[in-house]
Image (spheres, helix red, strand yellow):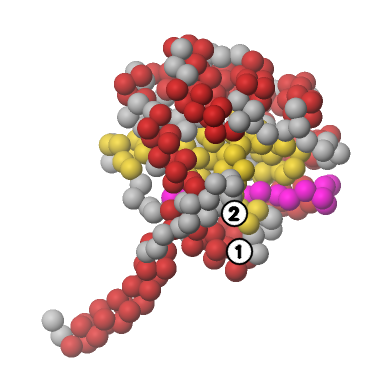
Amino acid sequence: MSLIIKYFLWILLLIIAPIIIYFFVGFSEKREDIKWGVNFSSKQAEFLGIDEKETYLALIEDLGFKNIRISVHWDLIEKDFEKYDFSFLDWQIQKAKENDVDLILAIGMKTPRWPECHIPKWAEGLSKKDQQSSIINLIEEIVFRYKDEEAIVAWQIENEVFLNFGKCPWKDIDFFEKEIETIKAIDKKRPVIITESGELSFWIASSKTKGDILGVTTYKTIWQSNIKKYISYFLPPIFYERRANLVKILFDKEVIGVELQAEPWCVNSIMNSSLEEQAKTMNLEQFRKNVDFAKRTGIKEFYFWGGEWWYYMLTTYGDDKIWNEVKEMLN
């Protein structure tokens, strides 16, 4: 090996080593003051064959959640062109008000739950320009309608736009910024949340946008389709804390956990997976590990991903282990 190559490798090591040490070495203090919330998607409830209203109320009235992120799917709100149906969302907000629940509404084309981009049938054949025009109209309709609702504490625009995940026709960051501007022009009081993968990003690109809060995912054990095997992410809690600190220093934005894995991620969908297969990525033991992990990230607000599945397990199989664990956590 030539002297030049040796010098180059040493210089490279001196550059990389501090970065690795900063992001991966160290221990976070375990915090017990986390604000716990839960995600809710009426589509997911329907997919699991459970009643959407019954499930939503159970999360609030039985478990006692006071913070919920609702996926407002475009294809459910606007099934026909410019004919908006807000009846179920109105009901959700009313029940939240009755129970002192704070809501985050996730709006746009790409909202949480598969297939991510929830495009109405009538809009599927439109040009990108026309789709974007309809999305702006959708955002305006939603924000104008609910901007005075005290139960809503924040808007989330789109979902993980920097991540190539889901069945989506296009990705346009300039349009994403326009969506943020559209919300802020109508509602100057509430923050706008942008979201990013907690495992596959350093959160810099999303933090550069005009959003106010960065929401990140936290997944621990999943089926990795590219290599066709189950994997457990090796990332330590300090990796989350150090990135959150960096986002705060560089962009003055808080980081919250918008998806803490609390349901299975299998080879196939939950409905096409046996209970044994589901348990490979989520059971009571794994749930407790994920909660403990969240407590050590330094992040002070987390929303569980899997509330619909808990209720499905409770009502379909009589499995109340995670349901009761959450109830004990919150009460």
**Which amino acid, by three-letter code, is at mark 1?**
Lys
Q: Residue at x 54, y 24 (%)?
A: 308
Q: Quadrant of residue 269?
A: top left
Which label number is shown at residue 191? none
Q: Position of residue 184 (x, y in %)?
A: 79, 51
- Say which residue label 2 marks: 255
**Which amino acid, by three-letter code, is at mark 2?**
Val
Q: Position of residue 272 (x, y in %)?
A: 39, 18
- What secondary structure is marked by label 2? strand
For label 2, the crowd category at 10 Å Cα-Cα, with few meaning under 14, some 14 to 19 and many 20 or more, is many
Q: Residue at x 71, y 43 (%)?
A: 155
Among the two numbered marks 2 and 1 on one chain, the one whose residue lies closer to the N terminus:
1
Most foreground residue, 276 or 321 = 321
Q: Which residues are magenta?
A: 186-199
For label 1, the crowd category at 10 Å Cα-Cα, with few meaning under 14, some 14 to 19 and many 20 or more, is some
Most foreground residue, 64 or 198 = 64
- Say which residue label 1 marks: 248
Mark 2 vs 1: CB contact within 8 A: yes
Q: Quadrant of residue 284?
A: top left
Residue 238 placement, left or right of 252:
left
